[in-house]
Image (cartoon, helix red, strand yellow):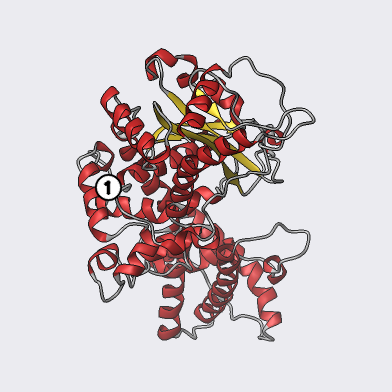
Amino acid sequence: MDDILSYIELFFCEYHALADNFRLSQPKKLNFDYPQMHKISYKISYIYLFCIRTRTNSSTFERTHSMPKLSKKAIYIKEYEAVVASRVRKACIRFYLDDEDSFEDEIDECMLRELAVLKESRYIFRGSYRQWETTWERVLFDCNYLTDDEFLSHFRMDRSCVMQLNSLVEDDQEFRSVSGKQGKRSSMLHVMVLLKFLGSYGNDAALAKLGLMLGISKGAVNDYVRRACNAILKHRDTVIKWPSVEERRDISGRIRKAHGFVNCVGLIDGTLFPLSFAPMVNGEDYYTRKGDYAIKGLVICDDAARITWVEMGWPGSVHDNRVWVNSDVYLDTDKYFDQKEYLLGDSAFSASAVMIPAFKKGHNRNLSEEQRYFNNKLAKIRIRSEHCIGLLKARFQRLRGFRRVIKEKKDLDAILRHAMCACILHNLLIDHPVPPDWLDETLEELDQDDELNQSVGQSGGDARRNQVFAYMLEER
């Protein structure tokens, strides 16, 4: 009570100045009896207290160039405080002049409560959460809303394949709710978000667009992708695996029957996964001969374009052969090959006991007729590795350009996880053909004028290639 009385005593000094501003006559003599001050209502005491504490010049609320930039909320509250302070001053004047107005007092009281609520609120301009017009259930099940062709274009597989994929991962712990936390959404929604994420390229890959289509926020897209990707990557060893002895025998039999190469168990080729932005660390290592930044990948597949082994993560400037000679398949050939088995590759690879590449031009000499014949025969089967990579990038267009900036190792790891997840899905969908129009811009062509025309010296690893070369000439 003593504090309130002291504030009231201070008010009389302020009142004389206010009276002059309002051109009021000298206030009537008020004989204050301190014991009677207990009769002052709490409302008026609070109004007066607020008036004294918030009293300031109107210029205080004006923004100047020297002041830091205020948020929209802060500006609104300051302007509201100025209005409330003005009304409180007028309320006090009405009280001491015995000119009370109950209606105005109610307005003042409401404004004071509203100001207190505004200061305690985190957001004041955000409306209710968006009511999404579309949900993932409607996208998945309503064929009138999204036709089968449109669904295939968005999610890169038909509805039945999406449901089969969901049945593969729906029991994964990534989608289980954690005690004490908000429950996670359906595994089906996670799968659809991942498929839309991997199948989008360019402006269509914006997180806001992905979230808008499936009824989730932009910020939640990465969480959904991460969980679904983790669940699918757990199936890597069962989906992408080196063929067994029986499987290698079947592969070599099909290749021999169709193209004449005996004991060939796979096709190898390198590829680039472009980056939209230069990496922040050692960016020059990722600069490729094509004039952009990329991550190097090496893929081994069979004659049906099924991936049997993949290596990725090397900078884009690294040569295909360097990735190959540092791979587990090359360093531990006894584990992956029988005595006579080998891979077919382009002229970028060096010949060895398990690698038969195309012939290159020698120093100051062209290829012989027999060598050109061999290269043509090899190209007809090796095109399957080009098809494999083309199908992979055609179905999952995210591989055509990653928009994430590589600032540290976790950024690179995230990109590699997405690429590996796409390879797993590629194998799962190997029996489902890709629409021809998807291949128009993504199918890689053989670079016949690149490595084949470069000069090369005599290599000591040509024994296996010479054997196959002689056999092909005999069978011609």
Q: Could you tell whether 254 is left or right of 315 in the image?
A: left
Residue holding disc 1: 182
Vertical comparison of 390 with 377: above or below: below
Q: Nearer the viewer, residue 34 or 303?
A: 303
Q: Residues within 10 Å of mark 1 (few under 14, many from 20)?
A: few
Q: Decide if residue 274 is in sight here.
A: yes
Please give the count of numbered marks on the rendered protein. Answer: 1
Q: Nearer the viewer, residue 396 or 369?
A: 369
Give the quarter of the image for residue 1: bottom left
Residue 5 picture location, percent across and down: 51, 59
Q: Secondary structure at mark 1?
A: loop
Residue 294 picture location, percent across and down: 61, 41
Q: Decide if residue 116 is in sight here.
A: no
Vertical comparison of 239 with 398: above or below: above
Q: Residue at x 39, y 69 (%)?
A: 41
Q: Residue at x 72, y 22 (%)?
A: 457
Q: Nearer the viewer, residue 49 or 313?
A: 313
Residue 426 picture location, percent across and down: 37, 45
Q: Residue at x 55, y 35 (%)?
A: 374
Q: Could you tell whether 185 is left or right of 347 in the image?
A: left
Q: Nearer the viewer, residue 203 or 174?
A: 203
Residue 105 picture location, percent across and down: 44, 79
Say what amino acid the circle numbered 1 marks.
Gln
Vertical comparison of 23 with 317: above or below: below
